[in-house]
Image (tube, coloured by chain):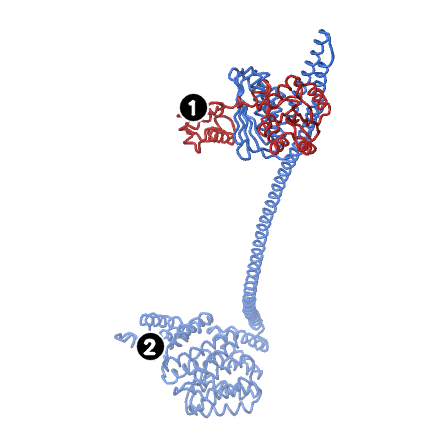
Chain colours: A blue, B red
Amino acid sequence: MFRRTGSLLLLVSFLLCHSFSFAQNSYIDSLKMQLEKGGLADTTKIQLLVKIGDNIVMNDPHSAFEYFGEAYTLSQKLKNNYLTALSLSGIGLVYDYKSEDDSAMYFYQKANSFYAIVPTQEARESRITNKTSMGNIERNRNHFGSAIRIFLEAAAIMEKSTADNKWQVLGIIYSDIATVYHDMKQFDKALAYDLKALRAHQQQDENNLFTAYTELFVAQDFSNLNQMDSALRYLQTAEKISKGLNSTDLNYQLYSGYGQLFSKEKKLNEALKFYQKALSEAMKGGRKFREMDSYRMLGFVYADRKQFRHSVLNLEKALVLVREIQNKNLEAGILKRLAEAESAIGNYRSSTEHFAKYVHLNDSLKEQESKKKINEIENRYQAQKKQKAIDGLRQANLLQSAKLKQKQILNIALIGGFVLLLIAGGLIYNNFKNKHRLLQQNEELNRQKIRELEKERKLVAAQSLMEGQEEERTRLARDLHDGVGGLLSGVKLSMSNMKENFFLSQSNVDSFNNVIRQLDQSIAELRRVSHNMMPESLVKFGLKETIENYCERLNHSGQIKVQLQTYGMDERMEQATEIVIYRMIQELLNNVIKHANAKNVLIQLVREKERFNLTVEDDGKGFDIAKVENTSSAGLNNIRARAAYLNGTVDIISSPGEGTSVHVEGDCTISS
Amino acid sequence: MIKVFIIDDHPMVVEGLQSLLNRLKDIEVSGSVSNAFDAIPFIEKNIPDVILLDINLPEISGIELCKKIHQQLPSVKILGISTFSERSYISRMIENGASGYLIKSASAEEIAEAIQTVMGGKMYLSVAMEHMIKPLSILPSEDLPALTKREKEILQLISEGLTNNQIAEKLFISPLTVDSHRKNLLTKLSVNNTASLIKLAVKHGLV
């Protein structure tokens, strides 16, 4: 149990100091004095501070911390990376001794990053030392994988090195790796690395302290593997080396190793002898742990030899020392064995007391252990949980963003759809509206067409009616004129002959003449009726001449002074049109003669290409147009109807006492 | 003896005329036909001195036949006969070479006088018909045509510088009517444009 409490390097470096400067305290004092003298360069001062820290850290970590701290502040001011790293590593070492692994690790890592950027041999070696410290912390935390990885990194750096102590350092690192495997109870692997370390040390120097220690480690590995012969052989090799070295510490380790081996082989006398030797070496060196450990092992061996009083004495001494160095695990073990030994010698009271203490301590240790484990598990669980939570959150985030995207897409789609729908709706509505309007327009157009057609139909009907009427009149007029008129003329001629041929009394002559006169009147009346019905000349010679004749006759009748003006009337119009215009003139003149009481009448008929206009104007009594229009006289209606037939308009100007002027205009190209 | 030929489609008239003429001295009826087609060959064979020609014949009218006979036999006197006295017929007959005109209801004396007159190389028309060959009394005698009330109004407004539409608005008539009045004015006063119209109107004191 002498090894594996720390790095071999620490162990050895301590041992070296211890071995080569016999009075450690005096060495430290000399360093302190050097510091107090002053007048040192900053770098020298820092190195001095670190050296003092390194030497006092094992027994006075608190003071060591102050030295390292001062060194750190100064090296920061100098911006010297190597010295900064050295100071940080020292602070890490302080926490390492105080078993504050987290803080130690933190400063070691910081130091490591500073060492890494300094390209000197010195820095590289220091970096490896620092790394081994880190590896040992990982080992203490049972982070074996991580510890081995760090050590291997350190070894890789060192294998490329060309330093003088290359093999020594490599040997130390291999030993560290072996220690990790030892902790992992993989003794064969521990042995393999220890042998590797041994070869490395032997390459450096066959007979130095490191080689000796490593021989001891190999021996222990064989012992653990129950290969006692091999173990004994390596112990003896170590013993040979130790004789030339004269190292109290090595001797102690050697004797402890023998004690352990013989104790395991139940060679209790031998074991007892070597443990006592170890104790004396431990007391020489003034090391409490080794002293305690020696008493403890002696106590165990005495108990095995059933020498319980001796056992109790040694164990009680060990108990006092273990309490001083506050190693609870060892204390528990000592208490248990003490209680057993006391019970064996009948000292039940103290035995019970110690056993109770053992149980209590063991429980608290186990509790601590389990707490530690629980914490570890808890931490791991928490970390896992956090990771899970992070993963969950990330997933949720992804999901949410996906959902959001989906939602956005959906929204866009919805809005797009809505807009499209609106547009479509608008278009449809517009289309519908347009269609509706078009339909309405069409309907209106159709209605108008129907109205026009109806009007046309009516007009055509009226036209045919009028034309038929006029035709009938023409025929009647001719029949009257030619037929009846001719007959009457013949009758008159015959009667005139009779008057000559027969003798008649005077009274008979008078009555005969009366008959002839009546016959003349009949013919005149026939002529008038016939002419009114249809002037022969209108058919044969046209409108202009007919109007002229008509007006001339009217003028000769002496009823009224007639004036006629015609323009553009030399060419004949359609007969139907001529008849219509003639009838209008007839009607208008009839009105004038019947109602106007006028002295003069002006008739004006003008043809301008397709249009004609007719004015009949008198100087008669006139009339109130409003009244006449309201009563809609038959005469005026005839005029309007006939004007309408010719697509024409009627314009009447008249007022009482001012005469009347009727103006008609329309198309003269109406053909039947 | 004066040979008289009668063309009339009324047998009663022909008969009446024949008996009436036969009683007269120095007059003999050489024949009679009832249509234009029969008339020409008859006349060519036996040329009469006077032809009594009815204006209203079927198919070819008396007026046209008159022209034809006059062209072929200019020496033959033609007297138009008709039931009624119509200026159109009378004037056309005379235009086509007729020497006079009678109405069928005329007395025997009138007929004898008419025949004697035309044979004497003169034109015969009864007193009642004389005006029918004179110029029309109804036509404006002055140089300036008569203007209607509307025409006077519109001429006034045109001279005031109003447009057709303005005039139409003022007189409550359609612009088309205003335009026809304006054209009438131009036609009646024999001018080509409104400026000349106004000038003329001013000259004659119409506005």
Q: Is residue B161 visible?
A: yes
Mark 2 highlights which residue? A47
- Given the image, what chain letter belongs to the residue carrying mark 2? A
Q: Answer left or right for A217 relative to A44.
A: right
Q: Is A44 or A388 nearer to us in this picture?
A: A388
Mark 1 residue element: loop
Q: Nearer the viewer, residue A230 or A522?
A: A522
Q: Is residue A498 left or right of residue A165?
A: right
Decide: few, some or many residues near mark 2? Use Cα within 10 Å; few <14, some 14-19, many ≥20.
some
Quadrant for the C terminus of chain A in the image: top right
Q: Can residue A660 be seen in this snapshot? A: no
Q: Residue furthest left?
A: A39
Between residue A228 and residue B162, name the one nearer to us: B162
Residue occupied by mark 1: B206
Secondary structure found at label 2 = helix
Q: Is residue B120 found left or right of A237 in the rendered image? A: right
